[in-house]
Image (cartoon, grey):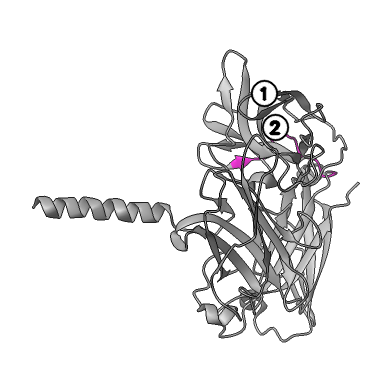
Amino acid sequence: MKKAIFLSIWLSCTLHSWAQEAFVYENKVYQSSIKTVECYNSKKEQSIPIYTLKSNESLTFSFDDLKGGNRGFSYTVEHCSADWKPSKINYIDYLESFNEDIITKYRYSFNTLQKFTHYDLKLPNDQIRPKIAGNYLLKVYENGNKNKPVISQRFFVLDPVLNVGTEIVASSQVVNRTKKQKVNFTIFHQMPIQNPHQDIKAIVMQNMNTHTAILNTKPLFVKQGSLVYNELNANEFWGGNEFRKFDIRSFRFKAEHVQEIYVDTINVAQLFTDVSGSAPKYTNQFDENGNFFIRNQDGRDSATDSDYTKVIFSLSTTPPNSKGNIYVVGRFNNFNLSEENKLVYDISKRKYFANIKLKQGLYDYKYIWVDETGKFDDTYFEGSFFETDNSYQVFVYYRKPGGRWEELIGFSHVNSAIK
């Protein structure tokens, strides 16, 4: 009886551990020592991680491990549906190569207080090469064990068989015309599409933020050679405000929005206190639409000479109610919500604080409010204006009649130019 009880407890704990360590189909870091994950088209730093099938284009993927040394990271890729679920097809169907490899390119940090190992990888390569278009999840794991996830990273492979025309206009609703932006787009094609409502899916995103993405399955008009998506109240996004930003490229002087720099066990950069940005009028300032760039003015190599900094954020504001939380987000954390980027209220200072370990560089960020139900509001602290410059992405997916997977066959990337 005791053996049976022990076995039951052991099995329960083991299954629970595996469940906790399973990969999820989103951009996520699973170990606290892993920092600064970057994935972009190699032609342009921090661009959208998309490349054209059977072209000379490639993706650059990199990250740092603060544990140092070489821990023997392996990786694989998996084809996914338009809504980021497993396609459940054999890797032979989507890879013309092996289905697993080891990350062999790494370098150690140099002249930094925080020691780390920098890993980087190019995709596709001789070992991993997708042969069909679509959504893919890059999975990095430790010592060849897929039950020890390290990073999951989304990327896209495009087979551009159609074109997407996109325009950004003010909201169709009078009450929101000064606050929202509307995305109208048309799919131009020369291929037979038997059932556009079933075979075609279009996903619209603002600033590559997956949390506010909108799925389109039904065009308003189906014409010869085109599908029109301009329904009156569809594909509307809050314009938001230009992102806040700070500059920690150097520890020798205090750059933009940095109030204080000092050394503890690592470098510390305390930012000026932010205030609620719900201003009555739009104020134009240049930003990178939430992006970040690793830069170092104190060394030669941004990848290995850039040190890590504990960045202290502070916000002076009154939240909408007491039943919710404030987070600081940007592309540097994939707009995800975690304990690390949640602000905590300090009664003595009457401010909200968060400290996040970040690598030297330039960063965009903003504050969002998440209520007790999990619904988040990215306009309460920042305001919302239709003049705000945002980037919009339209991804078009196609499933052949009787097909087992969805392919990415169209893509558009535009900036709003409502001024």
Q: Which mark is residue 381?
A: 2
Q: In the image, 1: left or right of 29? A: left
Q: Quadrant of residue 277?
A: top right
Q: Which residues are magenta?
A: 376-387
Amino acid, disc 2:
Phe
Q: Earlier in the sequence, mark 2 or mark 1?
A: 1
In this view, the residue in front, 45 or 109, is: 109
Residue, disc 1: 317
* Prevalent SS, magenta region: loop
Amino acid, disc 1:
Thr
Residue drawn at (55%, 53%), measured in percent from left and top? 70
Can residue 220 be seen? no
Relative to 46, residue 101 above or below = below
Residue 248 percent across, percent down from the top left: 76, 34
Q: In the image, 4: left or right of 207? A: left
Residue drawn at (57%, 23%), measured in percent from left and top? 345
Q: In the image, 345: left or right of 281? A: left
The residue positioned farthest toward the right in the image shown: 419
Cα separation between marks 2 and 1: 8 Å
